[in-house]
Image (spheres, rainbow, N blue to C red):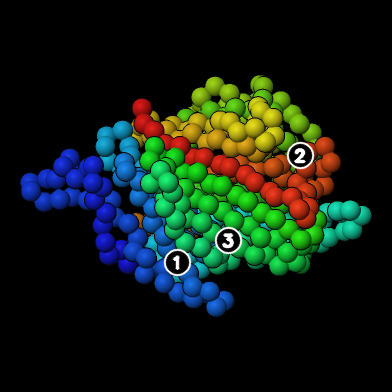
Amino acid sequence: MKRVFTYVAGALMLTACTTGTQKAPYELIAADAFDTTLNGRSVQLYTLVNKQGMAAQITNYGARLVSLWVPAADGSFKDVVWGYETIADYLDAGTDVYSGPVVGRYGNRINKGQFTLDGKSYQLTINDGENHLHGGSGGFWSKVWQGGVVTNADSSQSVVLTYESPDGEEGYPGNLTITVMYTLTNDNQLVLNYEATTDAPTVINPTSHSYFNLHGTTAQSTNSHILQINADSFTPTDAGLIPTGEIAPVEGTPLDFRQPTAIGERIEADFEPMKLAKGYDHNWVLNKANGQFGEAAVVYEPATGIVMTVSTDQPGMQFYSGNFMDGKDVGKRGDLHSFRTGVAFETQNFPDAPNHPEFPNPVLRPGETYTQTCVYAFSTK
Ligand code: BGC
């Protein structure tokens, strides 16, 4: 255990005092737990703390969110994302290497890792059955990004991370430069801003792949979270979770989250798309124009009172209910990464869009700038 310092939020110091001893509301991971060099690049752990005591820890290994301490209704703080306490643990991660990183170049799946662009065919690496998932086995999530912390005019702080993905990496065309900025605002929002440019036509769909548990521990299932998704439809898939191209209504299905509903209420429903995915692992088509920023989902855990609102300018959101987790990995504070104890809300273009001209356009060309904004906002009730 390498945690060596504690943070006492200024505003909370008085309430956190018990019998004259200052009791810190939470323990942060020390930067030296991530002190290593990978492929000649130095790995760092950055810590952002806002005026309300909310904290985000981010490493440049995979542009990953490591910890996210948010206030609960009783005034305590909960770390609501999965992660590990050391870089060694991240490198050893077995069943799920996608705890917290930015995945890409193309997040989610591409059918058989193949697509054609401007008449030229490309073959990407295959790392999920016969398909390409999350940018491949050497995707952005596995790279050491370059970056640092900046202080903004409004006193909030950001971690700015850049990765230069060479032409041909994992099979993708074009030298692509991507920057992801994590900003922790003073009103308890974690904002992710993405920007990318390329020197040759390519496809792009990066997304943040954090597993959230608003209990603050995987000892309790995320099935109790109450979820609302602003989507009238979803993209049905084949058994390999590749979209068929159909846009199907959620009406009358267990994927209808237009009214707040417990995740666990219908998770075992006898509904073919859910049997294929072993639970929820689908792309919802958000009720807004592509590029328009708006609320995608609201997640609420009654036991802690924590509310998380997910907003995006992307056309879709993959909600994945942790169906493939087996509890073999041990995360922070001994938390087992177990079946349905973490939920991901991946704001994105639709899976396999490079093979579906009817889906929103995933192509980035020289001279254009790709942008994406995703906000995870926290409150209590
Ligand atoms: C996918 C799941 C996959 C998981 C890997 C999710 O985005 O939709 O099918 O198992 O990532 O962690």
Q: Is residue 37 above or below residue 271?
A: below
Tell me if label 3 and label 1 are in contact, CB under 8 Å: no
Residue type at mark 1 is Gln
Q: Is residue 62 left or right of residue 16?
A: right
Residue 106 percent across, percent down from the top left: 69, 53
Give the number of the disc on residue 162.
3
Q: Is residue 252 left or right of residue 99?
A: right
Q: Is residue 336 above or below residue 229?
A: below
Residue type at mark 3 is Thr
How far apart are the alpha carbons under marks 3 and 2? Answer: 25 Å
Residue at x 47% of width, y 30% of height? 226
Element on which disc 1 rests: loop
Say if residue 262 shows up in the picture.
yes
Residue type at mark 2 is Pro
Residue 207 percent across, percent down from the top left: 61, 49
- Which of the 4 quarters of the picture holds residue 85? bottom left
> Where does label 2 land, which residue?
360
Residue 265 percent across, percent down from the top left: 52, 29
Give the number of the disc on residue 44.
1
Element on which disc 2 rests: loop
Mark 3: few/some/many CA within 10 Å (<14, 14-19, 20+): many
* Along the line of sight, the residue nearer the viewer: 225 or 154: 154
The N terminus: image quadrant? bottom left
Q: Earlier in the sequence, mark 3 or mark 1?
A: 1
Q: Earlier in the sequence, mark 3 or mark 2?
A: 3
* Along the line of sight, the residue nearer the viewer: 213 or 322: 213
Mark 1: few/some/many CA within 10 Å (<14, 14-19, 20+): many
Q: Is residue 265 above or below residue 65?
A: above
Say if residue 240 shows up in the picture.
no
Tell me if label 3 and label 2 are in contact, CB under 8 Å: no
